[in-house]
Image (cartoon, rainbow, N blue to C red):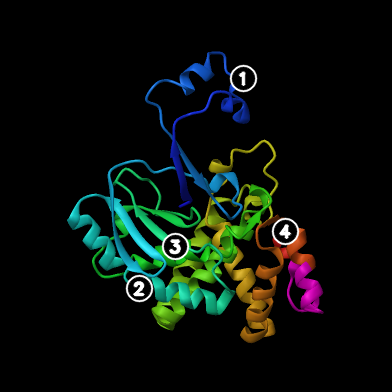
Amino acid sequence: MAAQHVDRRAPIAGETKMFGGESFDFDYESLWCTEGRIVEEFEMNQPVPPYLFAFAVGELGSREVGPRTKVYAESVPAVLDAAAQEFAGTEEMIRQGERLFGEYDWERFDLLVLPPSFPYGGMENPRMVFLTPTVIKGDASGAQVVAHELAHSWTGNLITNKNNEHFWLNEGFTTYAERRIVEVVQGEDRAALNIGIGWRGLNEEMERFKDNMEFTKLKTNQEGVDPDAVYSEVPYEKGFQFLWRIERQIGRPAFDEFLKKYIATFKFKSIDTETFLDFLKANVPGIEKQVRLGIVD
């Protein structure tokens, strides 16, 4: 997240009690008040789940690419210039996201391009997305990763799954939202291509889990399971297919209206699959007779 910097000061004796300093097995108070130590204070006005909290420390430079977006990277002009060029269309994606899903509630949408050692395509930390440098290709195609992380600003960050057994609420919705944004800014053909690639990937995952069908479900039982061991495209692509099926059944205008209401109702909350399904049935009467909602189990 890119919290607002509010103060820079010397440490104050006794304040370690606020964050449990007494529980350490060494003299944390003396360490805290060491001569020359500086305390930086930040303020985050929007609530975030702890898994979205991250630090990035280093010699960073930045380039402005829009009224709500700066691109940060190591302070190397060539890297900064390439990143700024790759992500020049970010503000248009934000505007399209707002049109589709409602107001952008995070104020800033900054991008941090990390060193090559960063192992993930992107991480949707609120207000400042972390990106691998491999998305900088020179042809703006890396913007698709940004579209996915931007979509998390509504689905995943604004409405968060209650726990990892309901992970599809984060990633299925975000994959759907990403493809809606891509359809507008890069065209229907690109969105259709992404759907096709995703469908092939989903079939590969279903084959992978053919002997453990629990993890082909959207809502999973992960008791005693390492989530990393069963991480897959299923929550992303099966979640997308489920939502796309509902959209095609009730029509895009009705589904868009439902999505905006869903986001407005549950923003800054954590929910589970049952909460979503209850909301769906309450706001789309008869949907359980048109779409197999039991697919989530």
Instruction: Measuring from the top left, give residue 237's x and y in whole percent.
Output: 55, 64
Return the disc, 4 or 1, that comes first in the chain's sequence: 1
Q: Amino acid at mark 4?
A: Thr
Q: Amino acid at mark 2?
A: Gly
Number of numbered discs overlaid on the protein picture: 4
Is residue 67 placed above or below 211 in the rendered structure? below
From the image, tell me which residue sits under label 4. Answer: 273
Instruction: Measuring from the top left, give residue 130's x and y in whole percent.
Output: 40, 52
* Residue sitting nearer the eye, 249 or 134: 134
From the image, tell me which residue sits under label 3. Answer: 109
Return the disc, 2 or 4, that comes first in the chain's sequence: 2
* Residue at the (48%, 41%) spot, across then down: 41
Query: Is residue 291 inside the magenta stretch?
Result: yes
Query: Looking at the rendered structure, which numbered label has been put on residue 22?
Result: 1
The magenta stretch spans which residues? 279-293
How far apart are labels 4 and 1 at the CA level?
40 Å
Q: Residue furthest top?
A: 26
- Foreground label between 2 and 1: 1
**Mark 4 secondary-structure assignment:** helix
